[in-house]
Amino acid sequence: MTNTEIVKKLVGNIQPAGDAHIDEERFKNLEAMCELVEDLVEEIDNVINYNREAEQNSIVKARKYADDFLQINLGRFD
């Protein structure tokens, strides 16, 4: 089972069904998923921010990967 599959199983379905009773629960799931994504993006951003001055190759590699991910996948530019 992948991390994504685990998270989806834990959070629950986020797709609206067009039924108010079902969609109320799914909206709560959507809010939880968005909060999780926000927290995860912050964790990735911290790799960049906490290691700006580091010169060790492994840290530079991680910082660059995190920065590229945020720019390419989320359109974030500093």
Image: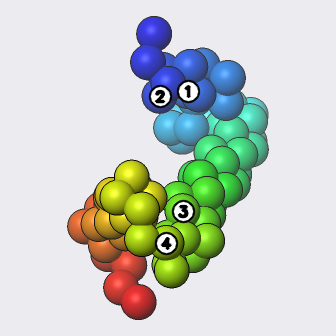
Give me the residue at 54% from left, 62% from top.
47
Question: With respect to residue 39, does 10 lie above or below?
Answer: above
In the foreground, 39 or 12 = 39
Circle 1 Cα neighbour tier, 10 Å, few/some/many (<14 / 14–19 / ≥20)? some
Comparing marks 4 and 1, which lies closer to the viewer? 4
Q: CA distance from mark 4 to mark 2?
A: 31 Å
Point 66% across, 56% down: residue? 39
Residue 51 in percent (x, y) is at 54, 70
Q: Secondary structure at mark 1?
A: helix
Circle 3: element type:
helix
Residue furthest toward the front?
Answer: 56
Q: Amino acid at mark 3?
A: Val
Query: Label 4 belongs to which residue?
Result: 54
Position above or below: 51 against 53? above
Q: Are marks 4 and 1 in contact (CB under 8 Å)?
A: no
Tell me: residue 45, above or below residue 59.
below
Q: Amino acid at mark 2?
A: Thr
Q: Are marks 2 and 1 in contact (CB under 8 Å)?
A: yes
State left or right for residue 78 relative to residue 45.
left
Which label's residue is closer to the chain start, 3 or 2? 2
- Residue named by callout 2: 4
Residue extending farthest to the bottom is 78
Q: Which residue is mark 3?
A: 47
Circle 1: residue type = Lys
Residue type at the position of mark 4: Ala
Q: Which label sits on residue 8?
A: 1
